[in-house]
Image (cartoon, rainbow, N blue to C red):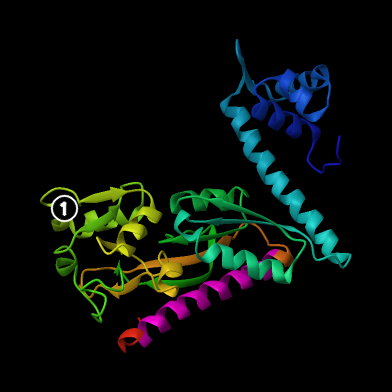
Amino acid sequence: MALHLVPRGILYIEAVAAAGSIQAASREIGISASAIDRQIVLLEDKLGVQLFERQTGGMALSPAGESFLVLARRWRADERRIWSDIKQMQGSEVGHVRLAAMDSMVNGVVPRILSAVFERFPKLQIDVEVMPPDGVPDALTEGEIDLAIAFNVRPNRDLHTVWSETLPLGCVVSPGHPLASEPDTTLKEATRHAIVLQSHALAIRRILEARHGWMFSEGGPPVATNSLQLVKHLAAAGTHVAITSELDAAPEILDGHLVFVPVSDRTASPQSVALVISTRRSLPRVSRIASEIVERVLSDMLAEVRARRMAATGAAPT
């Protein structure tokens, strides 16, 4: 078995939980089933609780066992950080960074971030987890991720905002659309055209319904989807107006396929995007530098998008 800083009992619980049975875990990690079973039984006897519910089809974690699984994830995160720190002390710029991002960023800012990070750290390992904003606080505090780029992050004492930027609400349309040449527009004007909106799975739809319910008084929009790619495709085709942020459509804005038109309604509250970390955990040096790179890439991309808008319309950057 490979060298681990995580205690054996924690590793065995994690392995059985993942595999679903002691026999399957034994095959997976190369430790005898009897040794795994013995260690789990010893822990259960000492704690006075069952860590697993023995079922006909295998083993399922009990509530107490779930607590151990959370502990295992945190211990593994600490283990990775320690190994990374040691390697860096030895002069090796290697390490492991786990970044969470929203689905809308996958074809835009995330590839830029990866390119910039690998230019600085060619041997770095990066895990990119796609998750909704609601999942970010728990993932950070439980040590499942190191950095997160998320929309509309609520204040939380367990989170530290490294960088944030306001994102005005706006429409994205094709360059040939009637709204494309306007310096700004209103939601009422936008709804005079065919609208494509995100489904309830995405936060912006819930925000629109809560603050601008009149848009839905006569039924739903012509098209609703949880796919941002479809939203942008319909907008670029010139058939629909999409209501979203400039960061969501940054790649298409920069290549000229879409135009961002800010919404001027006083009631149109802006969104925000933030780079956040956990206050409970210190970042290794390589992760701290990676966070600086992420901040720079985000800032640069937004600056490019806004400069393009200003050049096209003569409007002041938002």
- Where 235 falls versus 218 (above or below)? below
Counting from the top left corner in percent of width and height, residue 278 is at 58, 58
x 22%, y 58%: residue? 195
Quadrant in the rendering for residue 155 = bottom left
**Residue wearing tag 1:** 216
Quadrant in the rendering for residue 55 = top right
Give, as a single range, the part of the protein colored magenta.
287-311
Residue 181 as seen in the image, left or right of residue 193: right
- From the image, which quarter does the C terminus lie in? bottom left
Residue 261 as seen in the image, left or right of residue 43: left
Prevalent SS, magenta region:
helix
Please tell me how crowded label 1 is: few (under 14), some (14-19), or many (20+) other residues with Cα within 10 Å: few
Residue 244 included in the magenta stretch of the image: no
Residue type at mark 1 is Phe
Residue furthest bottom in the image = 314
Depth check: 69 or 96 in front?
96
Depth check: 148 or 222 in front?
222
Counting from the top left corner in percent of width and height, residue 308 is at 40, 82
x 84%, y 59%: residue? 86
